[in-house]
Amino acid sequence: MVTAIATVAAALAATAPGGTLAYERDRDISVDGRNLTRSNAQEYAPAWSPDGARLAYVYYRDGNGELYVMKADGSGVARLTRHGGEDLSPAWSPDGARIVFSRDRRIHVMNADGSGVRRLTALAESHSAAWSPDGRAIVFSSSGRTPENPELYSIRPNGTGLKRLTHTKGDAETLGDDGFPSWSPDGRTLVFTSNRTGEGEVWTMRRDGSGERRLAGRRGWDDWWPHYSADGAWIVFESRRLDRVDAYAVRADGTGARLLLRSASSPSWRP
């Protein structure tokens, strides 16, 4: 059965419009139907280095989230953090020299070898950061100033210039939850998720927060974790309902939604 699933996955991935996909399946990291990791602990959130040679990811080997890196073929596994808390949602700088991530729900940056960790902002309840292609901005989600309602913020890599980008006005009673931002390759557009309509959906906006619009959403499902393809033509995302999660893709203009992989979460296209 496992072989059959892998074969089908590889066939679907081979026709994927955006190229090679990394994703989590059955608690392991996979690339186009081939498992790169095999452990008894959760591994997820694969993030490609800009040159496509490495993957950073979250590994719960010791019962808490720590960041690891490996080569694109699964070899050369190295541990980056030994914090003892929760290190999550890694994303690379455009030059591949640094990684931005969430540590204990605050945004941090470090060198790509795990050294030089420093906190970028004191804003609490922050996660899912993404570095702009020009290296000048980092966008992330936080509910630190808006309890029960994560919003998107931008900040410079040196920790200055914090700016709120979305204003969905949600709270404990009204859904908002903007998160999981991803940059278009040209750096002009951000794709993100929001459940402001009652379900998780894929939205886009300009890098300054203007021009918000709903791009895609499957009725009855929650759609999260969007990422642009290397050419900017497609966006991949995970679609969840109950205990089922699949990877879908949609054109950058919101048309042509299609299934890419079944039982696949946190998908990301190789640069």
Image (cartoon, helix red, strand yellow):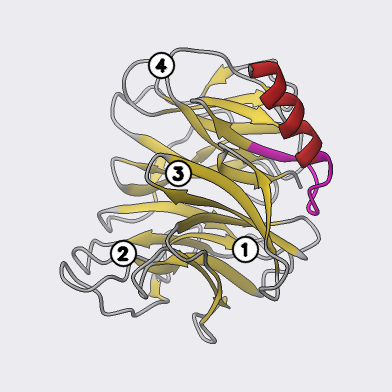
Q: Relative to residue 12, is residue 102 drawn left or right?
A: left
Do the CB atoms of the residues marked 3 and 1 lie less than 8 Å apart?
Answer: no
Residue neighbourhood size for the residue with mark 3, other residues' Cα within 10 Å, grouped as few (<14), some (14–19), many (≥20):
many
State how far apart marks 1 and 4 are (Cα): 30 Å
Do the CB atoms of the residues marked 1 and 4 lie less than 8 Å apart?
Answer: no
Amino acid of disc 4: Arg
Mark closer to the observer (3, 1): 1
**The quadrant where residue 103 appears:** top left
Give the answer, above or below, for where 33 lies relative to 243.
Answer: above
Q: Which mark is residue 61?
A: 4
Amino acid of disc 2: Pro
Q: Of marks 1 and 2, which one's residue comes earlier in the chain?
A: 2
**The quadrant where residue 98 appears:** top right
User: Can I make out residue 130 in this image?
Assistant: yes
Q: Which mark is residue 101?
A: 3
Q: Of marks 2 and 3, which one's residue comes earlier in the chain?
A: 3
Which residues, given as a range, are shown in magenta?
A: 14-22
Which residue occupies 34% across, 56% down? 121
Which residue occupies 58% across, 69% down? 190
Amino acid of disc 3: Phe
Mark closer to the observer (4, 3): 4
Q: Of marks 1 and 4, which one's residue comes earlier in the chain?
A: 4
Q: Relative to residue 172, is residue 188 drawn left or right?
A: right
State how far apart marks 1 and 2 are (Cα): 18 Å
Residue at the spot of label 2: 150
